[in-house]
Amino acid sequence: MDVLAEAFRLIITLDEDLFEILWLSIRVSLIALVISVTLSLPLGTYLAITQFPGRKFCILLLNALMGMPPVVVGLMVYMLLSRSGPLGFLGLLYTPSAMIIAQVVLITPIITALAIQVIENLHQEYRDTFCSMGVTGRRAVAAYLVDARYALTTCILAGFGRAIAEVGAVIIVGGNIDHLTRVMTTAIALETSKGNLTLALSLGTVLLALSLLVNALVIGVREYAGKRQYA
């Protein structure tokens, strides 16, 4: 109980070390999310409404990448950014930028695959109507994105939830360096191994709260979209 009380004290008193780790975690995950969404929504929309040879294979590959182990993603990014790798000259390994890259690689297939399902359903529903009205190309894509905004928001929130909870990939490419690349998940693993349960528990509490918040937002968006649909 003393450990639990001390953990909550760190949160309530806005402990400097705790909130430094929290801010880095949120900043890295949000930047990764923005980059991933910028890539995922156009790609998902293209794959959903365009027929071309190899399309099914691309979708199959994306679905397979959704379940890729994070440590494998971390290893791939590590080899890419290491000194002997093709991007080693950038010096990004063991920096927040490397962690952002790893999270982008990890969550982009998830958001893209979910976006494909959403846009494809709309395309099947509206394709004939749009063709009869002469709505094609960018206008059709814009209409799909606007109509699917609530469903796509849940996809984006799912991506953020996956990114903020990631540990395997970011610890490989970030190195868990204090005051530089230490985020909530890697700090929890380290502090638990050191026996510092107070900081680990406080970080775990904050991470759990963030997870609950993301899930509450997903449910809220779905309920709001349902009410709008039947209003």
Image (cartoon, rainbow, N blue to C red):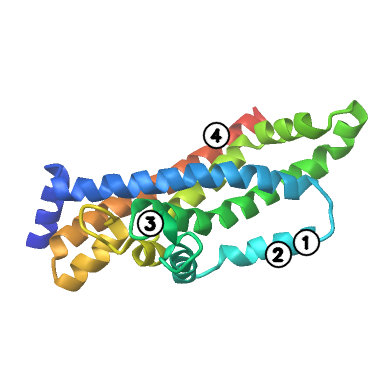
Please give left or right for residue 213 compared with residue 196 in the image. right
- For the residues labelled 2 and 3, the Cα–Cα distance comes to 34 Å
Q: Nearer the viewer, mark 4 or mark 2?
A: 2
Secondary element type, mark 1: helix
- For the residues labelled 4 and 1, the Cα–Cα distance comes to 33 Å
Residue under numbered circle 2: 60
User: Residue 190, position in %: x, y?
Assistant: 22, 67
Q: Quadrant of the N terminus?
A: bottom left
Q: Quadrant of the C terminus?
A: top right
Secondary element type, mark 3: loop
CB contact under 8 Å: marks 1 and 2: yes
Q: Amino acid at mark 2?
A: Leu
- For the residues labelled 3 and 4, the Cα–Cα distance comes to 45 Å
Residue under numbered circle 4: 224
User: Residue 170, position in %: x, y?
Assistant: 38, 61
Residue under numbered circle 3: 91
Q: Nearer the viewer, mark 2 or mark 3?
A: 3
Q: Nearer the viewer, mark 1 or mark 3?
A: 3
Residue under numbered circle 1: 56
Q: Amino acid at mark 1?
A: Lys
CB contact under 8 Å: marks 1 and 3: no
CB contact under 8 Å: marks 2 and 3: no
Residue in front for this viewpoint, 206 or 82: 82
Secondary element type, mark 4: helix
- For the residues labelled 1 and 3, the Cα–Cα distance comes to 37 Å
- For the residues labelled 1 and 2, the Cα–Cα distance comes to 6 Å
